[in-house]
Image: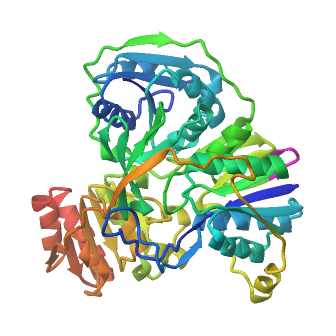
């Protein structure tokens, strides 16, 4: 079966995020960018399904500026077969991303679509669920285990207070949580091979989707900073302060 | 304006988070109705009717909603919500699952995880795991919003007298079915909702040493977390990770033990009310955010902490 994986180019998770002085956003100039960590887990899961003989082809799609092709190449180096780049320099919000992915799903007709549960920049946690609703598919969100059985997929989900397992009819959408797997690193030979794998580029207009945003960001501020507090001499003083000064125990 | 709040519950009791969502609805202003969708959830509806500021409780009681499947809730809420100006739910794993479906079915944007209401269409929400705070304005006619419960003081759960109306609407999409669930076995509170969290980092040296934290956690009724470094080193499982790519916590008291304070960890806990850091490296960045810092060897300090707590608790 064919698996479609969506990946997003975001700020590298190790970079310290700085708000621009004019409060219009976060400074992304000359900042290291990388594949969103939850998307890495999505790619890894697809590759494992292929290694088990469950998936026959992995198509990876990314929406974003030209540079997003770096993240598509990374996915290809990890084991995806083919890339699709929906190229735009505009900000694409979750609903519009889901509409673009719906158009790709209609072209490619995958049995399974795997996405990260959220991106670490906008932290929306929406696109997978929106895609599932728009395409009339079932969804297994925040997955920590994915098992394909014939025309069904069993998804174990990380929910508040425990785990929940669902059975979904295929085709279905799965979004990844942290415990699903540990992504591998790409080997140098595979990075070289990935450069020769096919990558199609298209625009939102080619897919017939209007990506005009519905939400406008009025301002972005740094969070109220914390002041360093006091150093205590010993454990007894610490417990005394927690009990009598902070009153939290 | 009219606001539909989707109750979070377990079919027997109303979760406190719902009262925080009602508080967010009050901050927006307008009539507030609460939708309780579940199976044999009459007690939840009664509890919701007593919440302060609620005008009407709508109850959809059917097996199709018993396990809060996103497809079924999405269809139900999109249909019930289309005549409201706002649809609100808590940003827990249930709300995060079905609300984007609601937004997509109504062809509107969703505003996720708000911590403040500026006006009826403008909301404040953390982005980049709380490293930046965005103020966003929604232009759609229906605002679909998930609410971070820690951002709003809950309304009173008693004293209200809303009317209760049964809905005879069954939405069963037939796309998914419940197989099983596994509740967290530990008596310890869930990390995300714990009032006190104690976390260990690479300084713990191995997984066995986390038992020291368990003893302190038992005394305090605390949840136990870990830094990414401790998870990556294989000391403890992934689900204990606090940080940008793990759990975001904001307890009353956060105790960081042997954690240096990498950016990605700070992003997950710096909204805690009181932060304690125990680390032998006095230059560790964690001390820059800690209210109380103790420069000490954790293998001496943690057993002492246990003894001192026994004296005062």
Residue A19 spot, x, y in % from top left: 35, 68
Describe residue B79's horizontal placement relative to residue B203 as left or right. right
Q: Give the answer, above or below, for where A124 lies relative to A20.
A: above
Span shown in magenta? A148-152
| Any part of residue A141 in sight | no
Question: Which secondary structure dominates the residues rendered in magenta?
Answer: strand
| Foreground of the two, B95 or B190 | B95
Q: Residue at x 41, y 67 (%)?
A: A26
Asked which quadrant contains residue A132, the reply is top right
Q: Nearer the viewer, residue B151 or B237?
A: B151
Q: How many marks?
A: 0
| Left or right of A182, for residue A54 | right
Q: Position of residue B304 (x, y in %)?
A: 24, 74
Is B85 drawn above or below residue B247 in the view shown? Answer: above
Image quarter hosting the N terminus of chain B: top left
Which of the 4 image quarters holds residue A39?
bottom right
**Which residue is located at x 51 percent, y 27 percent?**
B11
Q: Position of residue B68 (x, y in %)?
A: 58, 33
* For residue A118, side relative to residue A103 (left or right): left
Q: How is the image coloured?
A: rainbow
Seen at 55% across and 75% down, the residue is A33
Taking the magenta stretch, the answer to whether it contains residue A151 is yes
Q: Is residue B245 visible?
A: yes
**Outermost residue, left side:** A244
> Which quarter of the rendered picture does the C terminus of chain B lie within?
bottom left
Q: Is residue B280 magenta?
A: no
Horizontal and vertical percent position of residue B205: 45, 82
Q: Is residue A221 above or below residue A160?
A: below
Q: Is residue A19 above or below residue B3?
A: below
Q: Residue at x 63, y 44 (%)?
A: A129
| Location of residue A145 (image quadrant) | bottom right
């Amino acid at each position: 079966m064919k698996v479609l994986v969506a990946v997003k180019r975001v700020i590298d998770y190790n970079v310290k995020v700085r708000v621009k002085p004019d409060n219009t956003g976060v400074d992304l100039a000359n900042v290291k960018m990388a594949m969103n960590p939850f998307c890495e887990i999505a790619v890894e899961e697809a590759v494992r399904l292929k290694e088990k003989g469950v998936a026959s082809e992995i198509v990876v799609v990314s929406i974003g500026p030209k540079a997003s092709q770096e993240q598509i190449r990374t996915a290809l180096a990890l084991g995806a077969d083919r890339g699709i780049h929906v190229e735009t320099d505009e900000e694409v919000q979750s609903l519009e991303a889901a509409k673009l992915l719906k158009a790709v799903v209609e072209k490619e007709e995958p049995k399974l679509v795997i996405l990260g549960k959220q991106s670490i920049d906008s932290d929306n946690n929406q696109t997978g669920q929106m895609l599932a609703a728009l395409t009339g598919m079932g969804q297994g969100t925040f997955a920590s285990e994915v098992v394909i059985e014939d025309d069904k997929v069993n998804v174990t989900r990380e929910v508040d207070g425990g785990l929940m397992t669902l059975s979904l009819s295929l085709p279905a959408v799965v979004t990844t949580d942290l415990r699903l797997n540990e992504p591998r690193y790409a080997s140098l030979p595979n990075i070289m091979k990935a450069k020769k794998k096919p990558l199609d580029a298209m625009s939102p207009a080619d897919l017939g989707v209007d990506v005009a945003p519905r939400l406008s960001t009025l301002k972005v501020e740094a969070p109220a900073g914390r002041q360093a507090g006091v150093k205590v001499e010993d454990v007894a003083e610490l417990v005394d302060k927690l009990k009598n000064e902070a009153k939290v125990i | 304006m009219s606001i539909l709040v989707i109750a979070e519950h377990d079919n027997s009791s109303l979760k406190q988070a719902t009262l925080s969502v009602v508080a967010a609805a009050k901050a927006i202003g307008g009539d507030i109705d609460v939708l309780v969708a579940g199976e044999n959830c009459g007690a939840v509806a009664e509890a919701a009717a007593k919440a302060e500021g609620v005008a009407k409780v709508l109850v959809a009681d059917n097996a199709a909603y018993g396990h809060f499947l996103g497809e079924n809730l999405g269809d139900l809420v999109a249909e019930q919500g289309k005549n409201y100006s706002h649809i609100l739910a808590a940003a827990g794993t249930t709300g995060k699952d079905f609300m984007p479906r609601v937004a997509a079915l109504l062809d509107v944007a969703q505003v996720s995880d708000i911590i403040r209401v500026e006006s009826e269409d403008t909301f404040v929400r953390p982005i980049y795991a709380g490293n930046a705070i965005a103020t966003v304005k929604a232009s759609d006619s229906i605002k679909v919003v998930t609410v971070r419960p820690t951002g709003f003081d809950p309304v009173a759960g008693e004293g209200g007298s809303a009317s209760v109306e049964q809905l005879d609407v069954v939405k069963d999409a037939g796309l998914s079915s419940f197989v099983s669930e596994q509740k967290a076995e530990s008596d310890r509170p869930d990390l995300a909702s714990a009032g006190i969290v104690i976390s260990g980092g690479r300084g713990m040296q191995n997984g066995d040493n986390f038992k020291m934290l368990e003893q302190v956690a038992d005394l305090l009724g605390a949840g136990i977390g870990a830094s990414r470094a401790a998870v990556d080193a294989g000391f403890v499982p992934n689900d204990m990770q606090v940080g940008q790519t793990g759990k975001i916590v904001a307890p009353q008291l956060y105790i960081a033990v042997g954690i240096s304070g990498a950016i990605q960890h700070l992003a997950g806990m710096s909204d805690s009310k009181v932060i304690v850091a125990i680390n032998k490296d006095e230059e560790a960045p964690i001390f820059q955010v800690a209210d109380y810092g103790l420069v000490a060897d954790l293998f001496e300090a943690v057993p002492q902490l246990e003894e001192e707590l026994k004296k005062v608790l």
